[in-house]
Amino acid sequence: MVKIDRRDYGLKIAMPGYDVQTAPDNKLLFNSSFPILQAKVLAILGINALHTLPGALHTANFGGEFLEAKNTGFSTIYKFRWRHGLGYVPFTMPIDPSYFGSGSPWYVDEQYIYYINSVPPFYNTTTGERNPINLIFCSPTPVTDDIEYPYIATPLSFSKEHIAYLHDYGIKTSRYGFIEKNKELAFGDAGIDLRLQPQMILGVKTNKEFGNKAGDITYWVPNTLDMTDVTPYGFVQSKIDIGNGNTVMAWSMIANSDQKKWITMDVGTRSYKLTYGADDPSAARALVAVRSPMVSPSSDTIYI
């Protein structure tokens, strides 16, 4: 287990009325040392449904590669990959909930994001409308090594009045080409906006500590946080066939289903547990704990 020391280097912005040099973590609207879930990739990956197959198979967007269309006798398995180039296995998940509770067709290793499924990864419909089912989020956060961060302060909320006050407080950045003079920057086009507070990594726990063997991986929630302040994500490694006789070891996100409860919550012991699959109990697994933002709007609804 690698414990990350608290860092006092970079940029900090405190809430109005607080000294940035002495403000605790939950009074900081921005701290460049916070291990936030940044986005390396947030895009609908796939091919154009307006192009007829098989020609469309060779038009993967964002530099994606078509690997193979393999007829198994029962169906055709389509295989694609997109390069992220980070050199380690990053936190990667499909956003669409239809992939939760079932085997995800999305995988990731140290260099690529893979798609392997009997349905081609269309990024729009046959009418040209955007199809968000293959919206992928990839964060430059390693998930294969045990790590623990020290930022466990109790999250605070701020009111609508504070949100209005922060309209022109602090710093803002935007996506390239989205700044217009004297025009309000839409949240969807913002890079940094103090009214948008990100989730953060609390820690990563793996089964390396017991030799990649069967056994529950446990994350103990800090006493400063409620159980609902923490969201657990599970990942498992498996061997996948990427075509032409080539295989790689890649990771995919796993979620609970009616058939299998991968992740369980124990309120009594204040812990989350990631179990193992009976088909491959020694598979490498990781439990990633993500916390609520340090400061967030006092709202019950979050729109993504």
Image: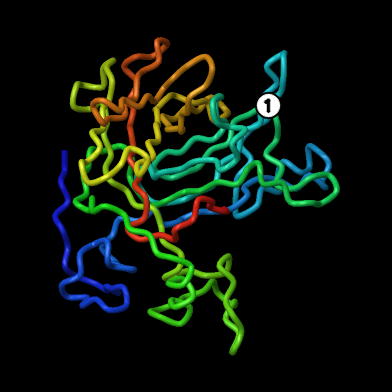
From the viewer's perspective, tell me whether residue 269 is left or right of residue 78.
left
Percent across and percent down for residue 132 are 67, 46
In this view, 37 is above or below 203: below
Q: Observer-nearest residue: 143 or 51?
A: 143
Q: Residue beneath label 1, please?
A: 118
> What's the residue type where badge 1 is placed?
Ser
From the viewer's perspective, tell me whether residue 124 is left or right of residue 143.
right
Spot the residue most to the bottom: 181
Quadrant in which the N terminus appears? top left
Percent across and percent down for residue 212 are 26, 22
At 66% from the left and 26% from the top, the residue drawn is: 77
In this view, 1 is above or below 245: below
Q: Observer-nearest residue: 45 or 20?
A: 20
Q: Quadrant of residue 214?
A: top left
Percent across and percent down for residue 185 are 57, 76
In this view, 289 is above or below 26: above
**What is the number of callouts on the image?**
1
Percent across and percent down for residue 239 are 44, 24
Spot the residue most to the top: 278
Q: Quadrant of residue 78?
A: top right
At 26% from the left and 32% from the top, the residue drawn is: 219
